Amino acid sequence: LIRVREIHISGNDKTRDNVIRREMRVEEQEAINSVAIKRSFQRLNNLQFFQTVEILPKRVEEDKVDLEVKVKEKATGTFSIGGGFSTLDQLNAIINVSEGNLFGMGYMGRIRGQVGVRRTLGIATFRNPRVFDGPTLFQVDAFSTQTNFLTYWEERAGGTLKVGRAFSEYMRGGITLIGEAIRIKDASSDAPTFITDQVGRQSTTGFRASFFRDTRDNFQNP
């Protein structure tokens, strides 16, 4: 058997070593496995942090090799700004800022804002896909909206908390907790009856569960 002596990583100026190592399906001192190396390549590509990924074995002893993991990083942040028109919002401006590899630790952060004649919207998201480099995902979202429906105003604020876990190489599931506060105010005499009956504050809570299996070799180009 040919065993892996050490795994060496290069080219990751921003991304931390542990973010790469936790995607490897070959461990040091284990027997080399071409299927596991191929899967490691797929998982590193699917991070969307790198332009290129290479995993090259280099013989160092008769029965041992070192794995040279060479990556070339790419930009993982996006910024966009735009505007538009809709029957509900009328004129509106939209801004999106996101970073898929926050602090080089694999975290995802995103902020979206929208300002319109009739509606304003703000959403913030933070996700840690591998808590303590383990199989657990943690994500929190917060949102706030204010909408002018002409005959009344509606304000919504809330958030979601998601915890997910990988059960195998291709299967994972999760539970999302949801909480939302709603306030209806300034209802005019023309407002629908079911709206005037709900003037004031309300709150809703709930949860949803998910389970899925994903065997794609490449998320962007399967």
Image (spheres, rainbow, N blue to C red):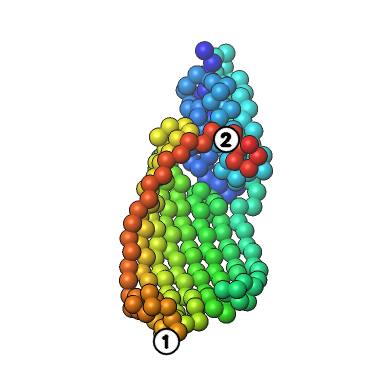
Q: Position of residue 208 (x, y in %)?
A: 38, 50
Residue name at image x 60 percent, y 45 percent: 48
Mark 2, secondary structure of its residue: loop
Which residue is labeled 2 in the image? 216
11 sits left or right of 154 in the view: right
Question: What is the crowding at mark 1: few (fewer than 14 residues within 10 Å), some, or many (at least 20)?
Answer: few
Residue name at image x 50 percent, y 82 percent: 150
Q: Which corner quadrant holds the C terminus?
A: top right
Report the front residue among 204 and 131: 204
Question: What is the crowding at mark 2: few (fewer than 14 residues within 10 Å), some, or many (at least 20)?
Answer: few
Which amino acid type is marked by label 1? Ser
Which residue is labeled 1 in the image? 189
Residue name at image x 37 percent, y 71 percent: 182
* Visible residue check, residue 67: no
| Residue 198 against residue 204 in the figure, above or below | below
Report the front residue among 168 and 192: 192
Residue 33 figure quarter = top right
Residue name at image x 47 percent, y 23 percent: 29
- Tag of residue 221: none
39 sits left or right of 144 in the view: right
Lower sequence index among marks 2 and 1: 1
Q: Which numbered disc, 2 or 1, marks the residue closer to the eye?
A: 1
Which amino acid type is marked by label 2? Arg
Query: Distance of mark 2 from mark 1, alpha carbons?
Result: 55 Å
187 sits left or right of 62 in the view: left
Q: Position of residue 43 (x, y in %)?
A: 55, 36
Q: Position of residue 187 (x, y in %)?
A: 41, 83
The number of discs equals 2
Q: Going by the picture, which residue comes out furthest to the bottom?
A: 189
Residue 174 figure quarter = top left
| Residue 150 against residue 8 in the figure, above or below | below
